[in-house]
């Protein structure tokens, strides 16, 4: 009986550990960025401000990210390690989401947790392979993108005795797609 209990506990710990996001982000110089990504960054509008370059790793894979400000909004442009665009995210406020999306997300949190607090909300535009890099970015920056955004929400949640910081991904209608538990040390950088 004790062996079965021990095996079950080990399985549960492994499952929870595998769902934990151990993301590390370090600031790097522009010269450390992949050439293909630099070509994209060089085509950003001239009035993009506060460009900051990062290398991000989760222990298994790594990617690159440039953060910047454009027309009073904060953006994060993420690249795969080979310099191809993965997505562009724009920082927003929960109250700025449309009513039905906001309602669906609120209903999920109310049904799933006894308490919750949003730390960060972003619209996430994943680049379709058929779109040109420059057009994709410019459409997002000009708020004319035909790509439906996902929503990434970092929230502090409590259910029963458990308390976590989690990163949730919702689709364009506000339905949950995925979540990961964040280690406390790995979410400090996400607050922009």
Image: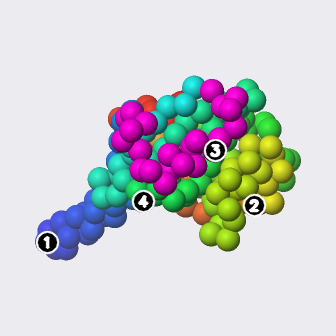
The answer to which image quadrant residue 15 occupies is bottom left
Query: Label 2, label 4: how many angstroms apart (C-alpha)?
Result: 23 Å
Which numbered disc, 4 or 1, marks the residue closer to the eye?
Answer: 4
Asked if the residue under mark 3 is in contact with the one under mark 1, i.e. CB atoms within 8 Å, the reply is no
Query: Label 1, label 3: how many angstroms apart (C-alpha)?
Result: 60 Å
Query: Label 4, label 3: how many angstroms apart (C-alpha)?
Result: 18 Å
- Colour convention of the picture: rainbow
Query: Label 2, label 3: how many angstroms apart (C-alpha)?
Result: 20 Å
Q: Can you identify the residue that label 2 sits on?
A: 147
Disc 1 secondary structure class: helix
* Mark identifier at residue 3: 1
Disc 4 secondary structure class: loop
Q: Can you identify the residue that label 4 sits on?
A: 82
Q: In the displayed structure, does residue 34 sit left or right of residue 168?
A: left
Residue at 81% x, 46% y is: 143
4 or 3: tag closer to the N-terminus: 3
Is the residue 13 above or below the residue 65 in the image?
Answer: below
Question: Magenta stretch: residue 41 in it?
Answer: yes
Query: Label 4, label 1: how many angstroms apart (C-alpha)?
Result: 46 Å
Instruction: Give the residue at the far left of this rendering.
Output: 3
1 or 3: tag closer to the N-terminus: 1
1 or 2: tag closer to the N-terminus: 1
Whether residue 9 appears in this view of the structure is yes
Query: Label 1, label 2: how many angstroms apart (C-alpha)?
Result: 51 Å
2 or 4: tag closer to the N-terminus: 4
Whether residue 5 appears in this view of the structure is no
Residue at 68% x, 62% y is: 132
Give the residues drawn in magenta, as a range: 28-49
Q: Can you identify the residue that label 3 sits on?
A: 43
């Amino acid at each position: 009986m004790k062996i079965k209990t021990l095996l079950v506990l080990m399985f549960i710990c492994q499952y929870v550990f595998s769902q934990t996001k151990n993301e590390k982000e370090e600031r790097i110089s522009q010269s450390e960025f992949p050439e293909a990504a630099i070509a994209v960054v060089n085509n950003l509008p001239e009035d993009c401000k506060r460009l900051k370059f990062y290398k991000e790793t989760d222990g298994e894979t790594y990617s690159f990210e440039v953060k910047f400000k454009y027309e009073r909004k904060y953006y994060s442009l993420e690249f795969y390690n080979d310099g191809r665009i993965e997505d562009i995210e724009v920082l927003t406020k929960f109250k700025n989401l449309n009513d039905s999306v906001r309602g669906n997300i609120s209903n999920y949190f109310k049904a799933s947790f006894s308490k919750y607090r949003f730390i960060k909300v972003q619209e996430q535009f994943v680049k379709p392979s058929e779109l040109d890099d420059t057009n994709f970015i410019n459409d997002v920056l000009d708020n004319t993108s035909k790509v439906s955004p996902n929503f990434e929400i970092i929230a502090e949640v409590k259910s029963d005795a458990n308390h976590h910081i989690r990163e949730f991904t919702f689709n364009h209608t506000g339905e949950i797609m995925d979540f990961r538990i964040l280690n406390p040390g790995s979410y400090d950088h996400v607050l922009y």
